[in-house]
Image (cartoon, rainbow, N blue to C red):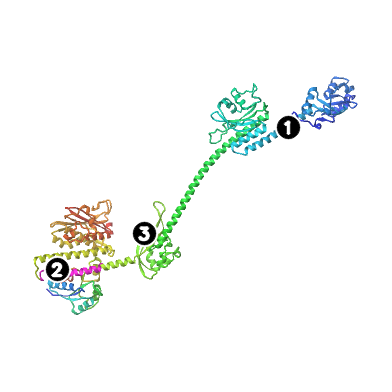
Amino acid sequence: MISKLILVIDDEEPIQKVVGLSLKMEADWQIICASSGPEGITLAEASQPDAILLDVMMPEVDGIQTFERLSNNLQTKDIPVILLTAKTGTAEKRLFQKIGVTGVITKPFDPLSLASQIAKLTGWLL
Amino acid sequence: MVFDSGARQLFSWEEVIDEKPLTASSQTLLPHALAKFVAQSDTSCMIALRHGKVAGIVTRQDLLSAIAHKANWARLRLTKVMTHPVITVAKSELSLVAASLLQQFKQHQISHLPVVDDDNTLIGIISYRHLLVIFREQKAEISIKRQHQHAQLFAEITLKIRQSLQLKEILQTTAEEVQKLLDADRVVIYQVLPDGTGKTTSEAVKDPYPAVLGMAFPEEVFPTEYQQLYAKGRVHAIRDVLAPNSGIAECLLEFIKQWGIRAKLIVPIVHPLASDQAAPRADSHQLWGLLIAHQCSGPRQWTDFELEFMQQLAAQISIALSQGQMLEYLEERVNLRTAELTEANRALQQEIQERKQIEIALRQSEEQLRLITNNLPVLIAYVDAQQCYRFNNQAYEYWLGQNPAELYGSPIKAFTQPDHYQNIRPHIETALMGEQVTYESELILKDSRRHSVSVSYIPHLELINQNQAKINGFFALTTDISDRKAIERMKDEFIAVVSHELRTPLTSLHGSLKLIATGRLGNLSEAGQQMLAVADESTDRLVRLVNNVLDLQRIESGEVTMDNCTCNAAELVEQAAEAMQTMAQQHGIEIHTQLKPLFIWADPDYIVQTLTNLIGNAIKFSAPHKTILLSLQPHSATPQLLQGAAAPSDSPASAALFCVKDDGQGVPSDKLDSIFERFHQVDSSDSRKKGGTGLGLAICRKIIEQHGGKIWAESEAGVGSKFYFTVPLSHDQIHD
């Protein structure tokens, strides 16, 4: 198994902890966390994670805006971004697909299969 | 007034006496006398004079007789042929009374009467023939005068009678005038009643004779045979009722004596009209009554004139009766017509009154309507077919600063921004085609702020006949929905926030519980693990509930619009089946499909959501080792078809019929409709047992309705359920 580095951008610390523990337990992946979009972008540029788990609803700069900035950033544009969102509506899902994210995982997620879901969306072998 | 019969008529001296008669000496030879006769051919006699005195008289006949019979006639003198002595009359003794003068000629059987003075000197001669001519001329003249006098008198009385059209007055006038004219003691008008009895209806009577007015007479007094005689025109004049030959019936004598009647003149009054006839008829006559003159002072010889006069007046009464009856008839008709006109007038007045009341009510109603419309917080306008304002309520002034009076008659375009007009123009045209339109827009009002408005155009249709209507214009109602929009936005934001705020801790909670449950973070006692399972299950339910509440809210608010496209319905069923496969396996359920290739016009994501929801329910309510059948077939939307029935071969299919059939516990028939309502479950404990939220079917119904389809269930408790829904076929599919 190849260890992965996942950047979690979520303003909720409990989510960061659950995601971190889930990925650790299931696939022994490492995570780094940011609590806001701008912080996440800086961290992505600096650490070049294998994938980014991005929360949609965040204060000031939300997940969609953050994604756009990541996409427009030469240093981060190739990093797969998976939205982690509580927005589950069909219309919202369409919007997410339209903007070109790698995938969407809805909250609450299954912590025992989160790594599997990410691997499936990114095409990694787990 | 008393008329002269003519017998006492006087001659005038000049007209009777020929003061230049043919004379000759008594010694005149006959040839000379003849010559005188010849010279005066119109003279028929010659007076022979001797010493200026009348010696004899010779007629033309005497002279001619002598010439014829005596041969020596030429030598004869008048004395030989004249008649003498001659009857003469002294002028002083001459009676110029016509009757006595004529009497003298008749008495002496003479044809000529010489008139002499006291010295027996000839003054002139009176010729019987001449006298007779004059007498006749005078008599004729008198007769003419009398006729004229009668006519004048009759005209005067007729005029008096005719001055009234009231029958009673006419009869009374007639009685009075006849009484005066005839100088009779009593004149009565007696009316014969239909039952044979009678009564005096009018009377004029001299003092001291008793009045008989109003007296009723029994039938015996005037028997039927008398009536018949009088009806034929009989006139009865009796000089003296007490005379043996008076012809008065015995039964009447008592009555006559009672009233002191000595002479009577009775003239019938016939009536050309039967009393029960509605209109006069000329061919019908009946005895109406009698005009009777009484003389009580003594016997009286009724003259022809009196008789004739009475008859004429009776005829006048008859005419008056006819006229009276005609008048009555006309009056009756007039009264009837008047009554009809009065009734019509009354009805008209009532109608006018009612119309006035309606008008007042309408005016009040209009005033109330105006008051209401002016105070409603809505822009109300009426726009005609030429897109011109015909009414604007006061709100136009309050909201937009546009005076309704100024707006009247102006085109909408003139008071609308060009780009805004281009936006609303299609809606206006739709309304003017007779279709109601409602749309939302924005308006900048007098406060310079942008307001959200909902606008409805309601066409004003006027029915021309049963099948045709004319569009006169439309009513435009504009409601400010800014507040509602703001609330909706707040609600959406609130739900979004709540959703996020609920989900975020739920996600942490859910994840943490799952991780604990792995046991890799430390072992729990059995009771601890049980509690952990309860907590895990509850968080799952809570997550589903939050998801469903959000879904339903989005669909109901119209926030979600179906992104319809032509899609393969069978593929969608397969997709949903695959998505639910894991859950089915967990419950030991098999999913089978029976699908026909159909293309529908739908939003595939929402159809899959509906299917997964129904399949999820079927799994939850099925016992292990049961099967769920998903079927798809064409369906006709014809209302006559039973729900769930496939389209018959002769009826074109217009929809796809989806069916999710299970062999589960089923739904009682009385709950088949209510299960589609929110938070409604067959058994309230289901949500706890099966982890349902009570919103799944409500969401399904909303989705299908937004597709223009229908959803329903058929079930038998304990046997299983069939959940159906229809979705319109795509245009291409229908045509195929």
Residue farthest to the bottom, as pictured: A46
Badge 3 amino acid: Gln
**Does residue B130 lie above or below B622 as drawn?**
above
Inspect the image, locate mark 2, and give the three-letter code of the amino acid beneath it: Leu
Residue at position x 48%, y 50% in the image: B352
Instruction: Say which of B178 and B555 sits in front.
Output: B178
Neighbor class of circle 3 (other Cα within 10 Å; few <14, some 14-19, many 20+) is some
Q: Earlier in the sequence, mark 1 or mark 3?
A: 1
In this rendering, the label closer to the viewer, 3 or 2:
2
Is there any visible trace of residue B467 in the rendered image?
yes
B627 above or below B268? below
Secondary structure state at the residue bearing disc 3: loop
Q: Do the residues under discs 1 and 3 have CB atoms within 8 angstroms? A: no
Which residue sits at x=38%, y=71%?
B448
Task: Label 1, secondary structure: give it.
Answer: helix
Question: Looking at the rendering, in which quadrant would you find the C terminus of chain A?
Answer: bottom left
Q: Chain of mark 3?
A: B
The quadrant the N terminus of chain A occupies is bottom left
- Disc 2 designates what residue? B513
Q: Position of residue B695 (x, y in %)?
A: 22, 61
Return the mark for residue B142.
1
Q: Which mark is residue B436?
A: 3
Q: Position of residue B94 (x, y in %)?
A: 82, 28
Look at the numbered disc 2 and give the secondary structure of its residue: helix
Foreground residue, B215 or B36? B215
